[in-house]
Amino acid sequence: MKVLKGYRFRIYPDEEQLTFFRQTFGCVRFTYNQLLMARKNTANSEESMKLTPAALKKDYPFLKKTDSLALANAQRNLERAYANFFQGRASYPKLKNKKSTWQSYTTNNQKHTIYFVDEKLKLPKLKSLIQVHQHREIKGLIRSATILAKNNEEFYVSLLCLEEVTSLPKTQKAIGISYCPKHLIHVSKPLDHLETIEEQMQEDRLIKAKRKLFLRAKIAKKHKVKLKDAKNYQKQKQKVHKLIQEKACRKKDFIDQLTFSLVKEFDYIFVEKQPSTVDSEETSLFTSSDWYLFMQKLTYKTQWYGKKYLAIEKPANTENSGQMIEELGKQRLGL
């Protein structure tokens, strides 16, 4: 079956490309905000809908210098935000802020305008190729590309590709899985290829780094120096931030590998729908957010590879084990 699959790579733009990206972020943000304010200030929704990126270009010529598809996608994003609001899935759309940590824009692949050349990426409106850390092979057709920037320092590209996925061989095996704050999962039977990241994620380095950051703050306070001006404090703050990022990346990679391993080994996967015991962020290696990400990945991977996934409501006051989940799942499917 054909599915839409996402790939995310780190990119390293040069100065000219950086300027283009920052200008595009600004134009996309400006377009989104103008369209939003028009809908807010106009009682007649039909009149506000007449305002389009093309119409804005007449009054603001600087918009002509950027990617027109990026501006069109800004309008689509606003329409999607309003749809989510009216259907009760989100709050009322807000204006975009240039001070936000993340800035982004999305463009589409039309007539082969987005492609790779020797691990370098070609994007619309950019004449030069962008250096990419392509750690995975793309097997499908690129549909769109989203450029993301964190603090205007780290740049990434997310590619949405149409890809052919074949079903995995059937094993006729079933497994029950429940939440575990220490190992993420309790399973009803041992797994051949399960490797926990408990040892890899020892927080000794992070704890020491945070302690050192606290001491740096005390020293700065003692010398009556503002934290934003304390160079040693700011350097240590960056180290702590980097360690936190590394921990999050290792955790996400572990969940990706674990879910694929489960889908490959089992035809029937029964999962606890609501974590019965959720510890605090401080005492848990894996939190409820990690559990819901785990469930989300299992949901679409079982669909892709022709397996069966079922979320089970576990009775209250029962032992937190995968065995109970497997038995309830088999009863539900009549296995």
Image (cartoon, rainbow, N blue to C red):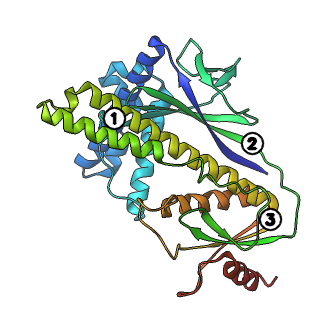
Pair 2/1: label in front = 1
Horizontal placement of 3 versus 181: left or right? right
Chain-order first, disc 2 or disc 1: 2
User: Type of residue at label 3?
Assistant: Phe
Disc 2 target residue: 163
Residue 187 seen in render: yes
| Residue at point 15%, 36% (across, down) | 221
Looking at the image, do the residues carrying marks 1 and 3 touch, with CB atoms under 8 Å apart? Answer: no
Secondary-structure class at tag 1: helix
**How far apart in space, not on screen, are marks 1 and 3 (Cα)?**
44 Å
Q: In which quadrant is the C terminus drawn? A: bottom right
Where in the figure is residue 60, as x and y percent of width and height? 31, 23
Categorize mark 1 by other alpha carbons within 10 Å: few (<14), some (14-19), many (20+).
Answer: some
Disc 1 target residue: 237
**How far apart in space, not on screen, are marks 2 and 1 (Cα)?**
41 Å
Residue 35 seen in render: no
In-front residue for pair 326/20: 326
Chain-order first, disc 1 or disc 3: 1
Q: Taking 318 as reference, is 281 above or below it?
A: above
